[in-house]
Image (cartoon, rainbow, N blue to C red):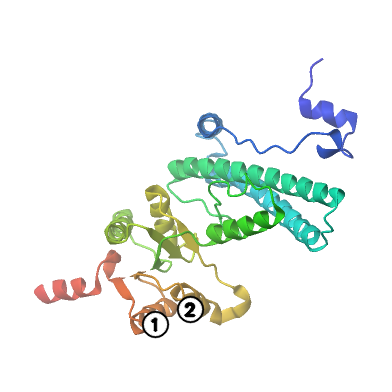
Amino acid sequence: MHTTLAAQLAALELGHLNIAALGRSPCTDHVDPEAAEQTLAAVWSDLFALFPDTALEDDAEELGWAFVNLFHRAAQKRSRQIDRATDEIRCLIASGDGSEVHTSQLENEVARAQSAEAAMLALECLRETAARLYLDETGHSWRPAGGSRANHGAALTSAVVDGRDFLNARAESRRKAVMPRGTPVVFAGGRLSFPTDDEAKAFAGNVWDTLDKVSEYVADMVLVHGGDTKGVDRLAASWAERRKVPQLTFSLDRRLGQRAGFRRNEQMLSLNPRYVVAFAGNGVLERLVIQAKEKGISVVDRRGPLGTHPKRAAREAAAA
């Protein structure tokens, strides 16, 4: 009788062992991107073909989000492993005595850290592939429930042979993952509702058209927004995903209470953005526009009806 590999391993009760104990050398080989793309696309297609005309149809988007989140959480776990290895490397360097034993320990720890980093990068690659499938399926950009969707890109430390080099490269990798290189453009808008689908589509079209025009002036644009999955930020995030524009999100710090929105404004403006793109919102957004103008930052004002320039509505009213 055949059983799955997982069932066979469980039956052997090997939970107390690990890969290192079995003598396996740390591996830094990457998953083939094309193979990953094809495999995930096939799995996604088969999975979502089950949902139409069933009781799960309304849960499809939530299940799709969870599918992407599998890879995100696994990548976060690997990132924490790298952090622990980095601390160990730092301690070994500080206590270095030049002995052969110490050198061997340092080399082994760097190798393990490199292997964990390779796994993290591969998992991030799988997450980004799954996120593109989620975008195609739902029309929405995938965002994690908490924290950021950091993307470390290409491996920075795969050729590291020295502990100090690893620490420096790790710090640079984390910096780039948090703040992509480019020119920041702040996007802001509130949670809006529209009486008809046509008006909602017109507004969404104006958001995308506006960002397209801004990107023509800022070739290396990094879109900065609040990451609100229920507001206009969601449209901007989907635009950035489609256009392959890097994103940086500033979530509200709920511990600050009513001060949270104003604090986020300060954080976003501290990046010295090229533009602030403003759609209709609340008083916190209005304050953002005022502060941006005080700092001499150009504001692309789209707070008029359906995401138009406010003066346009005034001109049309006067003409009527």
Q: In this view, does 29 lie above or below 96?
A: above
Which residue extends farthest top?
1
Identify the residue at image location x=53%, y=41%: 130
Identify the residue at image location x=43%, y=66%: 191
Image location (x, y in percent) of residue 123: 61, 43
Image location (x, y in percent) of residue 254: 60, 74
Image location (x, y in percent) of residue 77: 70, 50
Foreground pick, 171 / 190: 171
Which residue extends farthest left?
319
Q: What's the residue type where badge 2 is placed?
A: Glu
Image side of residue 273 versus residue 159, left or right? left
- Distance of label 1 from label 2 (alpha carbons): 9 Å
The disc placed on residue 266 is 2
- Examine the rendering and report whether any part of residue 18 can be seen: no
* Dot placed on the residue nearer the N-terminal end, 1 or 2: 2
Foreground pick, 316 / 175: 175
Rate crowding at label 2 as few (under 14), some (14 to 19) or many (20 or more) other CA atoms within 10 Å: few
Residue hosting label 1: 291
Residue 310, by quadrant, is: bottom left
Rate crowding at label 1 as few (under 14), some (14 to 19) or many (20 or more) other CA atoms within 10 Å: some
Q: In this view, does 163 lie above or below 114?
A: below
- Image quadrant holding the C terminus, namely bottom left
Q: What's the residue type where badge 1 is placed?
A: Gln
At mark 2, the secondary structure is helix
Q: In this view, does 266 lie above or below 248?
A: below
At mark 1, the secondary structure is helix
The answer to whether mark 1 and mark 2 are in CB contact below 8 A is yes
Image location (x, y in percent) of residue 184: 41, 65
Image side of residue 306 versus residue 238, left or right? left
- Examine the rendering and report whether any part of residue 11 can be seen: yes
